[in-house]
């Protein structure tokens, strides 16, 4: 083996090693017992206790829950508020819906993250890890629910979003919002069991609920599941989100990467050799 | 003892001479106070001040970025458009080193230098946009490989491609410094670097488009499709070549005194060749866009304000320059070709900004538009790049002939006899 062909082989091996790395990309879809939260919008009374306990549990500014004017306009979670409750005028009257991270089964944010700062834990919560994040905000571009928020007015900015009280969940406890909900609108448990409970609620009171569990299939399935008495559009949900998981949107491209990485150089080398004919014989040592 | 002392004093003497050479080269050449220098100098100064504010008070202090628009001008223009414009380097090296179209050899150095600097400055501008830039080493070292991320791929490819382009350009530096042996070694690496570079470019030019695949639903359907990566790749070919034509026109005026005889003689012919490739790739691009449009069943969307904007981009800034290129080729009209290349470049800016900003969350009530400070920083980055480019071109054999020794054993005549004969014939009269 002469030097050139050695270098070439080395390149090919290196390329295929990179390829193997890329092909492992589907690891986030593990189906270990994932935890989730079932939110029954028919039970929510809009007391905003969840907002309050969430803020104090995570060192965020605690909102004034007696201020009813917040319901006048629709709010989104912000970098200082991981969860918000909105009021909606629906065909079934006034209804409330809590919004926070959906903790997707295959999160777009985690697959977008090039440092694994945004990370799907094996229990289900999607967390953000400060020491890894480089602040590129690709998670924000990718998230179909527009959940990750960025601290634009800080020199040491963080990404802020609900982490399903990851520290508590790891110790076998419930997230604080679920723990403190006075109306029992929130339920914490294994995602599979929550789906069973949601279905049995729909079956036992078919007239009360729309026959749809938001999050069962949306964006490939989410950890947070919703029940409602009105179609979900009326509660401000995006119903055009589709059922394919978001990371799947890029797998086609990522699968093409190892192919290009291995075949392209070989093709270019061959082409380069084929066009060598105009040169003196001495150059033809390959 | 004596001989030892001799070598020592000789190497000291050599080091001194080298230091003197570097110092003399560092000094500016030509007049310092020119309108361009004053304006660009002030812009760079302003940019530095703004960046100090940005790094002490956060991105919100000087940008209009928001929770709804996490990526603005610095990503949409500096990085995504800038990298498309830098595509000329991989296309030209492909033609010269892989297809061995010797006709394009005179422009290869300037193009590679342009590409290298574009990556250093425009991809480097990514660092300005990062909220936590000190963690930028995480995806490179350590255990934080987010291998399923398109951005991971793009980041690695940026880095590796910069190295490949540096290797491609390194013989020029060696010639400048007079390092004969090192130059020989470095030129031996060129073909490998070129092939590696083309592969990387194919992937990250399309990868920049693939970044937006997960923004499904956030990008207007006229611009979103699963074919964004392919469209980005194809358009980077004519974007890069239009930039080569445009930049070549300016270089010909500004660096007239640095142009080699060979360079000047073949200029028209090279531009005509590049214009032909532009026309063909633009036609392919238009065809692909039409396919995507038909495939997406987007007929009803055309009769909306966004639809008119889409038509403006496709008809006014792709179809029209494509026709102008063809007309310019037919009439051998350089002005027409130059106009076409400028129009094509505007089309690329439009397309990249449409995907990253205009069609991104088009439904939002409060839209993003850049602050004057974001624009100022962008202009500062461009000015700094031009300064470095000028510094290098005025010193290294980029546009001029390489030093005699570099081609001593294999002059171009000996190496490619047929080509040199052809070159005489290329001297097309200027119209």
Image (cartoon, coloured by chain):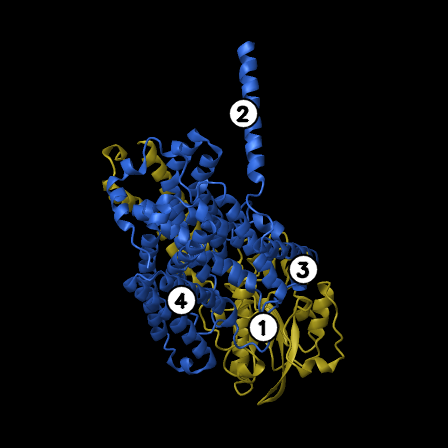
Chain colours: A yellow, B blue
Label 4 and label 1: CA atoms lie apart by 33 Å
Marks 2 and 4, the one that precedes in the sequence: 2
The residue under label 1 is A38
Label 2 with label 1: CB-CB less than 8 Å: no
* Image quadrant where residue A58 sits: bottom right
User: In the image, what residue occupies the spot 34% across and 75% down?
Assistant: B294
- Same-chain status of marks 3 and 1: no
The residue that mark 3 highlights is: B58
Q: CA distance from mark 3 to mark 1?
A: 37 Å
Identify the residue under disc 4. Answer: B226
Chain letter, disc 4 residue: B
Q: In terms of depth relative to the viewer, which is nearer, B386 or A132?
A: B386
On the image, the x and y values in percent for residue B413 come to 28, 38
Is disc 3 placed on a helix, strand or loop? loop
Same chain, labels 2 and 3: yes
Q: Quadrant of the C terminus of chain A?
A: top left
Q: Which numbered marker is on residue A273?
A: none
Of badges 2 and 4, the one in the foreground is 2
**The one of B219 and A259 positioned closer to us in this rendering:** B219
| Mark-to-mark CA distance, 2 and 1 | 77 Å
In the structure shown, which secondary structural element does the residue marked by tag 2 occupy? helix
Q: Secondary structure at mark 4?
A: loop
Q: Are marks 2 and 1 on the same chain?
A: no
Q: Chain of mark 3?
A: B
Quadrant position of residue B188: top left
Is B280 drawn above or below residue B392 in the view shown?
Answer: below
Q: Residue at x 50, y 41 (%)?
A: B395
Q: Nearer the viewer, mark 4 or mark 1?
A: 4
Verify CB contact (< 8 Å) between mark 3 and mark 1. no
User: Which badge, 2 or 3, is on the more N-terminal residue?
Assistant: 2
Q: How many residues crowd around disc 4 within 10 Å: few (fewer than 14), some, or many (20 or more)?
A: some
């Amino acid at each position: 083996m002469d030097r050139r062909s050695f270098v070439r082989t080395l390149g090919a091996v290196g390329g295929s090693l990179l390829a193997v790395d890329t092909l492992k990309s589907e690891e986030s879809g593990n189906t270990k017992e994932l935890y989730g939260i079932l939110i029954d919008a028919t039970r929510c009374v809009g007391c905003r206790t969840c907002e309050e306990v969430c803020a104090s549990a995570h060192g965020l500014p605690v909102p004034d829950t007696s201020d009813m004017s917040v319901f006048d306009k629709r709010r989104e979670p912000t970098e200082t508020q991981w969860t918000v409750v909105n009021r909606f005028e629906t065909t079934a009257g006034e209804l409330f819906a809590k919004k926070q991270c959906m903790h997707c089964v295959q999160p777009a944010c985690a697959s977008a993250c090039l440092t694994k700062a945004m990370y799907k834990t094996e229990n289900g919560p999607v967390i953000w890890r400060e020491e890894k994040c480089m602040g590129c905000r690709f998670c924000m571009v990718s998230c179909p629910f527009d959940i990750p928020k960025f601290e634009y007015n800080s020199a040491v900015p963080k990404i802020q979003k609900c982490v399903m009280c990851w520290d508590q969940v790891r110790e076998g406890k419930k997230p604080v919002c679920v723990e403190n909900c006075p109306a029992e609108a929130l339920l914490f448990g294994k995602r599979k069991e929550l789906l069973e409970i949601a279905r049995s609620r729909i079956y036992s009171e078919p007239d009360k609920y729309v026959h749809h569990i938001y999050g069962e299939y949306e964006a490939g399935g989410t950890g947070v599941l919703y029940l409602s008495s009105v179609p979900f559009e009326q509660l401000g949900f995006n119903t055009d989100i589709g059922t394919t998981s978001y990371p799947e949107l890029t797998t086609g491209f990522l699968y093409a990467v190892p192919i290009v990485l291995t075949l392209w150089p070989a093709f270019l080398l061959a082409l380069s050799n084929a066009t060598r004919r105009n040169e003196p014989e001495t150059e033809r040592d390959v | 003892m004596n001989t030892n002392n001799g070598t020592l004093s000789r190497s000291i003497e050599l080091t001194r001479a080298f230091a003197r050479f570097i110092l003399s080269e560092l000094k500016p050449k030509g007049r310092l106070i020119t309108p361009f220098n004053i304006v660009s100098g002030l812009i760079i100064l302003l940019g530095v001040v703004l960046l100090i504010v940005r790094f002490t008070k956060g991105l919100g202090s000087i940008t209009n970025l928001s929770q709804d628009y996490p990526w603005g001008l610095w990503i949409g223009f500096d990085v995504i458009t800038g990298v498309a414009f830098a595509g000329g380097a991989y296309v030209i090296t492909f033609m010269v080193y892989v297809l061995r179209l010797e006709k394009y050899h005179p422009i290869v150095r300037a193009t590679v230098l342009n590409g290298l600097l574009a990556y250093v400055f425009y991809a480097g501008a990514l660092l300005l946009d990062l909220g936590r830039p000190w963690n930028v080493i995480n995806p490179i070292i350590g255990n934080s490989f987010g291998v399923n991320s398109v951005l991971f791929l793009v980041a690695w490819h940026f880095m590796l491609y910069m190295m490949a382009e540096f290797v491609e350009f390194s013989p020029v530096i060696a010639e400048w410094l007079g390092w004969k042996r090192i130059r020989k070694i470095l030129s031996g690496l060129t073909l490998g670097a070129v092939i590696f570079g083309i592969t990387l470019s194919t992937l990250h030019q399309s990868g920049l488009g693939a970044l937006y695949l997960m923004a499904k639903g956030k990008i207007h359907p006229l611009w979103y499709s699963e074919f964004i990566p392919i469209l980005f790749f194809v358009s980077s070919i004519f974007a890069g070549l239009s930039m080569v034509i445009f930049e070549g026109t300016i270089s010909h005026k500004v660096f007239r005194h640095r142009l080699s005889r060979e360079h000047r003689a073949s200029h028209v012919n090279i531009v005509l060749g590049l214009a032909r490739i532009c026309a063909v790739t633009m036609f392919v691009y238009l065809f692909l866009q039409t396919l995507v449009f038909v495939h997406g069943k987007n007929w009803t969307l055309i009769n909306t304000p966004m639809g008119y904007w889409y038509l403006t981009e496709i008809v006014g800034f792709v179809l029209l320059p494509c026709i102008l290129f063809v007309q310019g080729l037919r009439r051998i009209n350089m002005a027409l070709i130059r106009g076409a290349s400028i129009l094509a470049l505007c089309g690329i800016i439009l397309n990249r900004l449409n995907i990253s900003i205009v069609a991104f969350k088009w439904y939002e009530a409060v839209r993003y538009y850049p602050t004057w400070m974001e624009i100022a920083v962008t202009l500062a980055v461009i000015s700094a790049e031009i300064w470095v480019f000028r510094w290098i071109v005025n010193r290294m054999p980029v546009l001029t002939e390489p030093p005699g020794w570099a081609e001593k054993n294999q002059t171009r005549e000996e190496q490619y006899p047929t080509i040199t004969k052809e070159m005489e014939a290329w001297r097309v009269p200027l119209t």
